Amino acid sequence: MRPRLTLRRLLQRPVRRWAGSSRRFTQNSPSFSRGRPQLPFLGIPLSTRQQFRYLTTERKQWIRYEVLLSLKYTVYIWAMVSCVTIAAFAVQQEWQEREHPTPPEWSYITRMRMRGAFFELNRKDVSRTDYVQVLQMLLDVLERLENPKIDGADIAESGVGGIVGEEAVRAFPGAKDLSKKSEQWRRGYFETLLAAAQAAEHVEGWVKDRTRGIVFPPEVVIGPSNPRPKPIPPGAKSAPREEDCDPMFPSPAQLYNKLMCTDGLTRRQHLETVLSFASWAAYREMPLASSLYQSALYIALPEEEASKINVEKWVQSLSRSGLTTSPSSNILEALTGYATYTARKGDVSDALPLFITLLKARQSLPDTSPKVLADRALEAGENENLAQKTLHAVKAFVKPPVYPPPPSDGTELPVRDEKERCQEAALHLHIGEIMYTARDSAREEGVAWTREGVDIAEEQLHKLGSATKNITAKTTCRECLATGLENWQTMVARLAKEEQEKKGSAQKSGWFGLWRDGKNEAAEGRWAAEEKVAKDRLRRAQDLLEDPEAPVRGASSILHA
């Protein structure tokens, strides 16, 4: 009975909730377990690791802000780079326009291409001119000028034939009549076509590979016409085959004939064309050169005189009696070219009197008047103070460049300025070279003529100075000085060598040199001493021969192309 009563009491007791304890997994009670510590890198990763939410609303806003900010800065930076590039391009074109003016009537693209061509043609920071690029740019300019839809309005096909007649026009079609165009337009067309003809002299015979579109010189083409082709430079494309090639550029003769047949040019421009064509023909040893130089003389003479006289007889009379009247600039240029061609042919007996006649004619020219010299000094700003020079420099920078006025037509009497005196120095060099090579007895006199020409050219270069704007005169004097120093050094070197050989033979003729004369030894050492003088003059003249303007480097080089 007692076990049943005990069980009944237990069942009748009310159930109460335990208030003094809590669930262990909800309490942060310290664990006093002395078991092994659990380190994160020693634990085994669970496959059901707890995931966290990384892309919150705040993070989305931050990412959106950063993306927009980066895009904004990218746009700003590219806008600044574009503005700087456009400004640099504008300054570059402005600088090229001042160096190589173009007619304002032409379109902007035509003017830009012409400026680029003349800039590449006159660059001083490269060792070799890229005549392929220059000629291609000039031909593009000519194509735009002859296109009636671009810059060639009011031009027609040539009917008169310039200075060569209608028969030449039929033989060489493509010449234009520029009579309806302005003087600036015609002058720019003449300069472009003449420069293209002169550039074509350097790329004559170049071909283009049709299969690859690459231009090659004729000496590397593989074919029957070139049995021994030159090797291709390292790193260049392989040589083309002759059957895959076409002529790339027109020949210089085609361009010169086109310019000679052009109507609307002045006699001076026709004279420059014929002289340039004749110089190239003489270099190529073409029989056409003689008739071209005679044509240049006909062009240089006045029209009423050219139709009455025979050029050959007239030149012979000049060699005997000289010029009876004051010559024009055209006559002096044509006679100088004809005399140079005669000397190169080997007819020194006919060329020497012509050179002497030309020298006398140039020396008789009137000197530059003091008024003209004062006007030049005023134009150059030599007497201005610093403030005036600064003001003029600012005005010149802001004011757009003006196309230069038309040059002289060559019919008036020239003035004996720096350029004409350098032409006199060139005549001294021609006379000295002819006398040195003509006969042995006149070699000393030839050296004297050459030395005098060097002195004249160096004196004129010192007068011009480095800041002169007369680039033509400076170039002429510089070329004359370089040629004169080279000729002088070559002449005295040969004479010094012969002198040394004579000295050696004289030493062998006596016993140990006991009977040598001291005076003769001093006289024989003259050419060796002059050779040292020539070398020293060449060393001291390097500042005059070299261009002092160094190529622009650094960040400012982008403004100077």
Image (cartoon, rainbow, N blue to C red):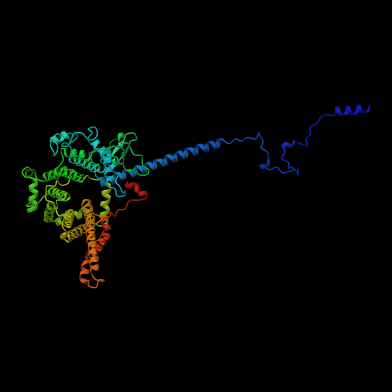
54 or 85, which is in the foreground? Answer: 85
Q: Relative to 201, does residue 464 appear above or below in the rendering?
A: below
Q: Relative to 330, does residue 46 appear above or below in the rendering?
A: above
Q: Position of residue 538 (x, y in %)?
A: 26, 59
Residue 374 seen in this snapshot: no
Q: Position of residue 189 (x, y in %)?
A: 21, 40
Horizontal side of 350 relative to 39 (left or right) equals left
Who's the residue at 16% across and 39% down the image?
260
Most distant residue in the right direction:
1
Horizontal side of 450 relative to 21 (left or right) equals left
Horizontal side of 209 relative to 1 (left or right) equals left
Residue 510 location, quadrant? bottom left
Quadrant for the N terminus in the image: top right
Horizontal side of 357 relative to 255 (left or right) equals left
Q: Position of residue 483 (x, y in %)?
A: 22, 55
Residue 238 seen in this snapshot: yes
Residue 55 location, quadrant? top right
Residue 264 location, quadrant? top left
Who's the residue at 81% across and 29% down the image?
15
Q: Position of residue 512 (x, y in %)?
A: 26, 71
Q: How many marks?
A: 0
Most distant residue in the left direction:
308
264 or 510, which is in the foreground? Answer: 510
Who's the residue at 93% across and 28% down the image?
2
91 or 22, which is in the foreground? Answer: 91
